[in-house]
Image (cartoon, helix red, strand yellow):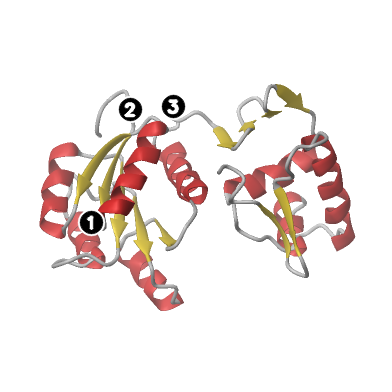
């Protein structure tokens, strides 16, 4: 794998502005970053740098992202490197094609930077658990999953186990709306019968613990849909 002290990421993206933005945010998080603008360059940079993770755009000049993914998977030394595909295509069939070719995850453009970094952290935790602290931090809220502690600004936030699990789920996927049923399945388990209203009660407790007077509420209620962690909270 790449640099022995820093996890490394190769960005394969022909759009210069997006590449610069991704690089800036990844370096700020402590990653070593390599770049490639087209397929041929990508294959040679990947071989030289042996990155821990590859961010691959679906739409590239010359070789498509799918073809690059296929070629990377055909090489013994790069076969197991995780690949996150960036795609403007929202169609389910295209996403499945990407995953079938060997991509590990995909993010549909446009995406928030907090969502992108959360996905990168999730992959890094899986492949290099010793190097990536198990902390989710968005805005002034930080969740340390090793010690089961949550802090906001400079104070400790005391949460019950249920509120903690709800917050963990929401912070893992900022911007994504979870229905009450999805939160019930995640937090209580699919085989336990709990009323939908119970989720609202725990969300109320979570908000009370998280938010002191004048502080912005990061938990969004999405009418008739559910709840999400506000993806603009970090900005």
Left of 109 or right of it: where is 37? left
Residue 215 appears in which quarter of the rendering? Answer: top right
What label sits on residue 130 in the rendered view?
3
Query: Which residue in the structure is indicated by mark 1?
Result: 73
Label 3 or label 2, whichever lies nearer to me, is 2
Q: Residues within 10 Å of mark 3 (few under 14, many from 20)?
A: few
Q: Position of residue 15 (x, y in %)?
A: 26, 58
Q: Position of residue 229 (x, y in %)?
A: 66, 50
Q: Residues within 10 Å of mark 1 (few under 14, many from 20)?
A: some
Q: Nearer the viewer, residue 132 or 114?
A: 114
Query: Which residue in the structure is indicated by mark 2?
Result: 6
Question: Cα distance, mark 1 to mark 3?
Answer: 25 Å
Q: Nearer the viewer, residue 52 or 110?
A: 110
Label 1: element kind? helix
Question: Cα distance, mark 3 to mark 2?
Answer: 11 Å
Q: Nearer the viewer, residue 6 or 142?
A: 142
Contact flag, marks 1 and 2 (Cβ < 8 Å) = no
- Decide: is 26 above or below 147: below
- Look at the image and tell me whether residue 55 can be seen: no
**Badge 1 or badge 3: first in the primary sequence:** 1
Residue drawn where x is 44% and y is 62% of the image: 110
Question: Cα distance, mark 1 to mark 2?
Answer: 23 Å
- Decide: is 104 above or below 67: above
Residue drawn where x is 58% and y is 46% of the image: 172
Left of 59 or right of it: where is 229? right
- Look at the image and tell me whether residue 104 can be seen: yes
**Badge 3 or badge 2: first in the primary sequence:** 2
Q: Position of residue 186 (x, y in %)?
A: 70, 53
């Amino acid at each position: 794998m790449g640099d022995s002290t820093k996890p490394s990421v190769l960005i394969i993206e022909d759009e210069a502005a997006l590449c610069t933005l991704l690089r800036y945010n990844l370096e700020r998080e402590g990653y070593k970053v390599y770049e490639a603008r087209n397929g041929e360059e990508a294959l040679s940079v990947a071989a030289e740098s042996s990155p821990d993770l590859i961010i691959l755009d679906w739409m590239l000049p010359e070789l498509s992202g799918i073809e690059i993914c296929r070629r990377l998977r055909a090489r013994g030394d790069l076969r197991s490197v995780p690949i996150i595909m960036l795609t403007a295509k929202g169609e389910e069939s295209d996403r499945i094609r990407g995953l079938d070719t060997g991509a590990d995850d995909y993010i549909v453009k446009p995406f928030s930077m907090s969502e992108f970094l959360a996905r990168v952290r999730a992959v890094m935790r899986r492949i290099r658990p010793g190097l990536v602290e198990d902390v989710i931090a968005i805005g002034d809220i930080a969740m340390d999953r090793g010690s089961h502690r949550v802090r906001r600004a400079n104070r400790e936030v005391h949460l019950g186990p249920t509120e903690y699990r709800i917050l963990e789920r929401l912070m893992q996927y900022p911007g994504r709306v979870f229905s009450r049923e999805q939160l019930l399945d995640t937090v209580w388990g699919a085989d336990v019968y709990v009323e939908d209203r119970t989720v609202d009660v725990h969300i109320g407790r979570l908000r009370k613990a998280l938010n002191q007077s004048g502080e912005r509420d990061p938990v969004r209620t999405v009418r008739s849909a559910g709840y999400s962690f506000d993806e603009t909270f970090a900005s």
